[in-house]
Image (cartoon, rainbow, N blue to C red):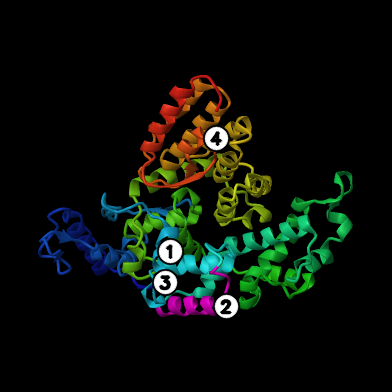
């Protein structure tokens, strides 16, 4: 139902009755009288929580009577209607959500067989130019195919591209501008010509630094133009990262920018970001309301069930985000340049550089981002990770900064284990043990990411190891390494 549907006593009664019925239905027995009740071949009851879809999609307006008190813009204290139980999270048999792996599994199928996760990630990779392999170069035909499938499923692909994937697209352009400035290569996409219209060459050269480009100054100058381009340029130009407008034309667009489509951002966050810490505040709020049947999902119920979010983890992240908001120390800066940088967009580039053994290139990627996002947890952790083999002292400082803005869970466990390795590399085995212990105190069962291969380090090699699941075994290996090395640096 739309926002305009009436909130009649009849609808509130239906909401209450269905919410009570849903609350009384629990695993493993479930409720055989439910019309959606099904059994697997072995007789085990299964539940798709269709009741939650009805509450959220058809009756969500009945959960918020006109007498409610609105707080913090989006949350409400509902009078007279008890909040129903949240949707059930991931079961123990399910693996942690890994958008990259899901996409790799489904990309060779006919596109009609792709899930929403694969569709959104396929579009992200096409528009972000951050390919997983050389055989998957940007293609307007592929983008049109994905967009056509999204339309069939009731999702507006243009909103996904211009709003949801805004940060991914602009990050790729920022990377192109950086490389062009550093290498001096010809730019056939039009960005250098655009920059010269607003900032002549001598304005972004540092005369006391051998004529090196002042990247920060350039990005701040081009930010409003890049924002307008992403929202108004032809979609084919957005795919090619090509700018055809003049600076004057883009500045005129800037006077009438559309409002942020937070639902499109939520869609992209939900199906691309592995960890909730990488979601926007508005996306977290929307997920909370969805889990508690106070709003509809973004797409078909089956697509929403591709990812199950644990309500306890979500509550923990929301509490931390709320505290940061109240204290005025939000991780993401509100300035325009920061908004153009999507940290995870550069992750595949850094991984590729590390796998090639080019740690200096990976370091340069995150140093660039840290200039714009100095307090971002992910930037500090990833820069520290890239520096760890060669500059363990600086790496340890960055890990300590990342811990200050992390919440308990797999990401904090990862950062503490990285800190332990950095301290061990610096010859401080005592503090390495301390960091290792703190890391073990955090639940890491939902971890997905890269760590340094400890067995290879013993042989003098720095090789990435992809871990999907608990970090417990890694922590045990690190403890053995700490005990073996004692006070020596490795």
Q: Which residue is mark 1?
A: 104
What residue range appears in magenta? 135-153
Is 405 situated left or right of 119 in this image? right
Q: Which residue is mark 4?
A: 460
Closer to viewer: mark 1 or mark 2: 1
Q: Is residue 265 above or below residue 148?
A: above
Q: CA distance from mark 1 to mark 2?
A: 20 Å
Q: Residues within 10 Å of mark 3 (few under 14, many from 20)?
A: few
Is residue 222 at least partly visible in the picture?
Answer: yes
Check disc 1 and report its element: helix, strand or loop.
helix
Instruction: Return the mark for residue 435.
Output: none
Check disc 2 and report its element: helix, strand or loop.
helix
Q: CA distance from mark 1 to mark 3?
A: 8 Å
Q: Residue 446: x percent and y percent?
A: 37, 46
Q: Residue 448: x percent and y percent?
A: 42, 48
Closer to viewer: mark 2 or mark 3: 3
Q: Is residue 25 above or below residue 416?
A: below
| Front position in the image: 262 or 227 | 227
Task: Pick whichever of labels 3 and 4 is earlier in the sequence.
Answer: 3
- Quadrant holding the N terminus: bottom left
Is residue 68 at least partly visible in the picture?
Answer: no
Check disc 4 and report its element: helix, strand or loop.
loop
Tags 2 and 4 touching, CB below 8 Å: no
Q: Main secondary structure of the magenta part?
A: helix
Kindly give the residue lying farthest to the front in the view shown: 459
Q: Which residue is mark 3?
A: 108
Q: CA distance from mark 2 to mark 3?
A: 18 Å
Task: Pick whichever of labels 4 and 1 is earlier in the sequence.
Answer: 1
């Amino acid at each position: 139902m739309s926002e305009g549907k009436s909130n009649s006593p009849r609808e509130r009664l239906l909401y209450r009755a269905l919410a009570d019925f849903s609350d009384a239905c629990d695993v493993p027995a479930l409720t055989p009288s439910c019309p959606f009740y099904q059994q697997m071949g072995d007789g085990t009851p299964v539940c798709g929580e269709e009741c939650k879809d009805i509450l959220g999609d058809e009756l969500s307006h009945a959960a918020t009577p006109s007498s409610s008190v609105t707080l913090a813009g989006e949350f409400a204290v509902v009078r007279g209607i008890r909040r129903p139980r949240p949707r059930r999270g991931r079961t123990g048999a399910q693996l942690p959500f890994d958008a990259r792996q899901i996409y790799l599994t489904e990309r060779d199928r006919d596109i009609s067989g792709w899930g929403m996760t694969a569709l959104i990630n396929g579009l992200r990779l096409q528009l972000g130019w951050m390919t997983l392999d050389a055989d998957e170069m940007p293609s307007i035909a592929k983008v049109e195919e994905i967009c056509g499938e999204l339309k069939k499923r009731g999702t507006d692909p243009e909103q996904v591209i211009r709003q949801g994937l805004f940060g991914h697209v602009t990050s790729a352009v920022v990377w192109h501008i950086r490389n062009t400035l550093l290498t001096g290569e010809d730019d056939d996409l039009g960005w250098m010509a655009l920059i010269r219209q607003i900032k002549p060459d001598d304005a972004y050269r540092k005369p006391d630094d051998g004529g090196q480009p002042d990247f920060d100054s350039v990005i701040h100058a081009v930010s409003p133009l890049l924002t307008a381009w992403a929202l108004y340029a032809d979609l084919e130009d957005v795919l090619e990262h090509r700018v055809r407008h003049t600076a004057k034309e883009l500045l005129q667009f800037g006077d009438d920018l559309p409002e942020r489509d937070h639902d499109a951002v939520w869609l992209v966050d939900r199906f691309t970001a592995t960890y909730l810490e990488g979601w926007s505040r508005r996306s977290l709020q929307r997920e909370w309301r969805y889990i508690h049947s106070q709003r509809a999902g973004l797409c078909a119920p089956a697509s929403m069930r591709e990812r199950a979010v644990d309500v306890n983890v979500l509550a923990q992240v929301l509490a931390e985000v709320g505290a940061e908001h109240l204290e005025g120390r939000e991780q993401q800066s509100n300035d325009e340049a920061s908004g153009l940088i999507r940290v995870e967009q550069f992750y595949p580039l850094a991984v590729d550089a590390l796998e090639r053994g080019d740690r200096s290139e990976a370091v340069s990627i995150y140093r660039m981002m840290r200039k714009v996002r100095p307090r971002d947890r992910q930037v500090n952790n990833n820069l520290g990770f890239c520096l760890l083999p060669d500059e363990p002292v600086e790496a340890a400082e960055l890990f300590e900064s990342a811990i200050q803005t992390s919440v308990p869970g797999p990401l904090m466990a990862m950062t503490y284990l990285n800190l332990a390795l950095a301290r061990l590399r610096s010859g401080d085995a005592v503090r390495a043990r301390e960091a290792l212990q703190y890391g073990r105190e955090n639940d890491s069962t939902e971890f997905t990411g890269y760590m340094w291969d400890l067995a290879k380090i013993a042989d003098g090699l720095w090789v990435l190891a992809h871990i999907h699941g608990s970090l417990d075994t890694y922590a045990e290996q690190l403890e053995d390494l700490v005990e073996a090395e004692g006070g020596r640096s490795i």
